[in-house]
Image: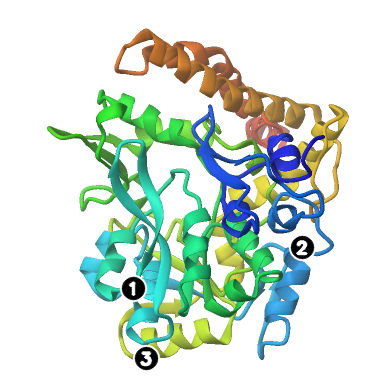
């Protein structure tokens, strides 16, 4: 008899994001988290799941529930004085742009250093006893992992982004066993899963007091890190340290570099070299990310992101955008940050915050409608989202098919690269050539570019013939 759990439902439907919350709260210790063939994480059943238990399904962010980010967000923040709401951002109190005043912290942070400063302040101000965050490890097979940090001075170890699979199972088990006040920082789907868990688990509800979120465009498997390492001509099996956001004074924050180190050497690759192609094309992307509609971590008390706006993207040290939702988060930003001179922040219109993440908003809203329609036409089970399936324009349909081809082929291509025993990416890129070539032409002739091109040609013709029409 098939078990009724996330393994038979979420994982079988290729919708698992690998957050590990299901294994962390399983009342019968039936689930463990293991690495899958694509380099991500999945729960695995030990075979003693009870038919009467469905706790794991209740906390899974990619299973259908009677409530979504809008309804949960309303419960969390709807009664907060001064709260506002936007479809794109969810509930919010205020939006800010800026950075930490301490230049050392700013340079060590991913953008303007605001997330690291906020977590450190929670500990310094004795608002929480522990912070759950992602830190680098020395294991080549697990370069990053969630960790519980209690010393404010250790928070800097969690600075900078980690585009690497991590999971929460062992950390949540520790929270259940270890009383205290906790803060958690994570991606939208991770925050949602823990919020769902607190609806059913009183210990987690009482102990996790503050949620900090990050804007997320997609989650990557370990293949992304391996491909970048190979681009640097290093052996991925020997890597001890990887930095996804290395800033330099010579380059703008929008063209950061990524560095990797083994026991003997350190190598670097620029974002504009291979990294941007691998990221933007969706290589090594989780399939579940195709069905996410939360851009701004709507269930987090505060959300941090890069200020990808023309007026800030060129600053080498980086700039943060911040959304506050809870009164506590707003007070920390206002009093501990701005008033005390710890943060150089100014209010910014929410429209500018949305504009800074416009590509992700389009991907997770407008294009999500099309992806849902395409999947449903293939006869596949699709999760309930806050947008309805909508038939795409033929060119958009081709974009969707091409993106999925690149995503799925990247795993196969990397496997062939490994089998070749070559250190670099020559075999991988050869396998990806046709799909990437099609992607280039699809973007060159997408609807907006095509219409803009026609308009430009018409305007040029008008300019040429206008003098001839004058009497």
Residue receiving disc 1: 150
Mark before the other along the chain sequence, 2 or 1: 2
- The answer to which of 411 and 427 lies nearer the viewer is 411
Disc 1 is placed on an element classified as loop
Q: Are marks 2 and 1 in contact (CB under 8 Å)?
A: no
Q: Is 44 on the left-hand or right-hand side of 343?
A: right
Task: Report crowding for label 2: few under 14, some 14 to 19, many 20 or more residues within 10 A (C-alpha).
Answer: some
Foreground tag (2 vs 1): 1
Q: Are marks 1 and 3 in contact (CB under 8 Å)?
A: no
At 84% from the left and 27% from the top, the residue drawn is 378
Mark before the other along the chain sequence, 1 or 3: 1
Q: CA distance from mark 1 to mark 3?
A: 26 Å
Residue 159, horizontal then vertical, whole percent: 33, 60
Residue 290, horizontal then vertical, whole percent: 67, 40
Q: Are marks 3 and 2 in contact (CB under 8 Å)?
A: no
Disc 3 is placed on an element classified as helix
Where does the N terminus fall, quadrant-wise? top right
Task: Report crowding for label 1: few under 14, some 14 to 19, many 20 or more residues within 10 A (C-alpha).
Answer: some
- The answer to which of 310 and 177 lies nearer the viewer is 177
- The answer to which of 153 and 6 lies nearer the viewer is 6
Is there any visible trace of residue 186 in the rendered image? Answer: yes
In the rendered view, would you say 54 is above or below 231?
A: below
Q: Is 361 on the left-hand or right-hand side of 33?
A: right
Foreground tag (3 vs 2): 2
**Residue 193 quadrant:** bottom right
Mark before the other along the chain sequence, 3 or 2: 2
Q: Is 188 on the left-hand or right-hand side of 104?
A: right
Give the residue at the far top of this rendering.
420
Disc on res. 68: 2
Residue receiving disc 3: 339
Residue 119, horizontal then vertical, whole percent: 39, 73
Q: CA distance from mark 2 to mark 1?
A: 32 Å
């Amino acid at each position: 008899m098939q078990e009724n759990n996330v393994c038979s439902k979420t994982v079988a439907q290729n919708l698992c994001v690998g957050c590990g919350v299901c294994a962390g709260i399983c009342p019968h210790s039936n689930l463990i988290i293991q690495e899958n063939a694509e380099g991500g994480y999945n729960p695995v059943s030990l075979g003693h799941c009870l038919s009467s238990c469905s706790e794991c399904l209740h906390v899974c962010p990619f299973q259908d529930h009677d409530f979504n980010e809008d309804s949960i967000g309303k419960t969390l923040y709807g009664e907060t004085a001064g709260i506002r709401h936007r479809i794109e951002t969810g509930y919010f109190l205020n939006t800010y742009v800026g950075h930490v005043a301490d230049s050392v912290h700013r340079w060590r942070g991913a953008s303007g250093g605001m997330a690291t400063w906020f977590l450190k302040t929670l500990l310094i101000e004795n608002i929480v006893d522990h912070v759950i965050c992602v830190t680098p490890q020395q294991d080549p097979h697990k370069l990053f992992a969630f960790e519980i940090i209690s010393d404010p001075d250790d928070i800097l170890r969690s600075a900078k982004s980690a585009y690497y699979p991590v999971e929460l199972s062992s950390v949540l088990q520790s929270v259940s066993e270890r009383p205290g006040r906790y803060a958690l920082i994570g991606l939208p789907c991770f925050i949602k899963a823990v919020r769902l868990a607190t609806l059913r688990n009183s210990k987690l509800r009482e102990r996790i007091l503050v949620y900090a979120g990050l804007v997320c465009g997609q989650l990557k498997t370990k293949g992304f890190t391996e491909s970048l390492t190979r681009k640097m001509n290093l052996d991925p099996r020997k890597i001890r340290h990887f930095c996804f956001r290395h800033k330099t004074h010579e380059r703008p924050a929008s063209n950061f570099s990524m560095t990797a180190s083994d026991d003997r050497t350190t190598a670097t690759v620029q974002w504009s070299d291979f990294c941007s192609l691998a990221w933007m094309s969706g290589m090594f992307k989780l399939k579940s990310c195709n069905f996410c509609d939360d851009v701004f971590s709507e269930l987090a008390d505060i959300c941090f992101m890069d200020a990808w706006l023309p007026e800030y993207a060129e600053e080498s040290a980086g700039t943060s955008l911040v959304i506050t939702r809870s009164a506590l988060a707003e007070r920390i930003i206002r009093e501990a940050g701005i008033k005390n001179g710890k943060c150089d922040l100014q209010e910014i219109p929410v429209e500018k915050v949305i504009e800074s993440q416009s590509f992700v908003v389009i991907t997770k809203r407008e294009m999500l409608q099309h992806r849902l329609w395409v999947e449903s036409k293939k006869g596949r089970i699709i999760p309930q989202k806050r947008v309805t399936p909508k038939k795409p324009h033929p060119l958009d349909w081709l974009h969707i098919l091409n993106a999925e081809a690149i995503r799925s082929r990247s795993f196969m291509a990397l496997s062939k690269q490994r089998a070749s025993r070559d250190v670099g990416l020559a075999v991988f890129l050869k396998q990806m050539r046709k799909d990437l070539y099609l992607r280039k032409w699809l973007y060159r002739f997408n609807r907006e570019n095509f219409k803009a091109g026609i308009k430009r040609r018409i305007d040029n013709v008008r300019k040429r013939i206008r003098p001839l029409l004058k009497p």
